[in-house]
Amino acid sequence: MNRLIKEEKGAVMIIMALLMIVFLGITALVIDGGMLYMEKQKLQDITDAAALAGAQELPTSTDQATAQANQAIVLNETNPILFNINFNENNHRITVTAEKSIDLFFAKALGFNEAKVDAASNVEIGTLISGRGAVPVGIEYTSQIAFGDIKYLKVEDATVGNFGALALAGPGAKLYEEDFKNGYENELRVNQIIDTQTGNLAGPTSRAVNFRIAACPTSTYLNHPVDCPRIVLVPVFEPVVTQQNQVKQVKIVGFANFFIENVSSGSQSAVIVGRFIEAADSGEIDSGSLNFGAYGYKLTR
């Protein structure tokens, strides 16, 4: 009988030891597994933020794109050395990858000291076909857009051949000036029909342009923050309704980015001086549409 009892006690101890191993395994799976999931999600969020930040400098400068991506990583209190940043051949895609070792807790009892988590984010840029924050000045699609060259946008009644003022929020100089200062709050899309703006817009144009310059006074078209108000989204249009040599309505065929240098105004018209640049911003993209230097971007994983 004593021997049987001893054998049963030994069996119970073996069972308890096995149950303890199972318990540690389940605990490690729940606690350490949950921690690994959270760390992976955090790393994924950082690679997303870095790729999106870098994409805003494409396709013009991979150096600035890399700097913006690294800045986003630092702002998330992470060491950039953990991350790799790469671009495709035409600089239309940025890829940010990362790998990180995580110390485990309960799994150490099972012989596992650490585990690795990784993340990858791709942001691709393409022709912008919709956007918010546009200014109420459009250019005809037949105009020459040479990136970096000085260009003069003459704002007056939308006569054929001129750069026309647009009635985005509605007719009237007050709405026009507000849209120019702050950007049109609603979305504009390719193939959308827009009314033109009429009347004397010299004063509103001059005030709005100087307002934007004052908000970003030291920037140049080659050196500026991505959110500099001097970079404006400009609709590119073709006339659809013309009466007595005056354009009444236009159709948006694309978008361009314009960096404002200065403005001059007379009694009836204003001339905005600046340069067309290539830049990316948030918005829907379509690789088959006409491109005028305005890009949108899309995040994939």
Image (cartoon, rainbow, N blue to C red):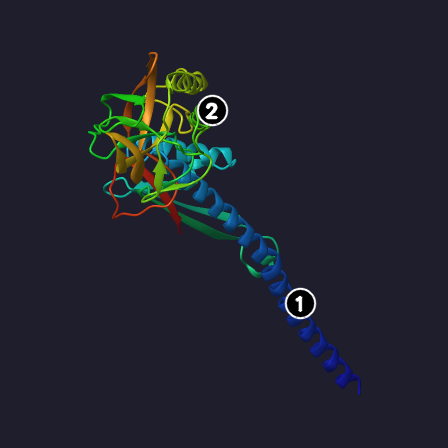
Image location (x, y in percent) of residue 70: 41, 34
- Which one is earlier in the sequence, the residue at label 2 or at label 1? 1
Q: In this rendering, would 150 be left or right of 118? A: left
Residue beneath label 2, please? 174
Residue at image position (40%, 26%) is 225
SS of the residue under disc 2: helix
**Disc 2 versus disc 1: distance between alpha carbons?**
76 Å
* 219 lies above or below 85: above
Residue at image position (44%, 18%) is 211
Residue at image position (43%, 16%) is 207
Q: Nearer the viewer, mark 2 or mark 1?
A: 2
Residue 280, quarter of the rendered image: top left
Instruction: Give the camera-side residue of 299 and 288.
Output: 288
Image location (x, y in percent) of residue 299: 39, 47
Q: Amino acid at mark 1?
A: Met
Residue beneath label 1, please? 20
SS of the residue under disc 1: helix
Residue 135, quarter of the rendered image: top left
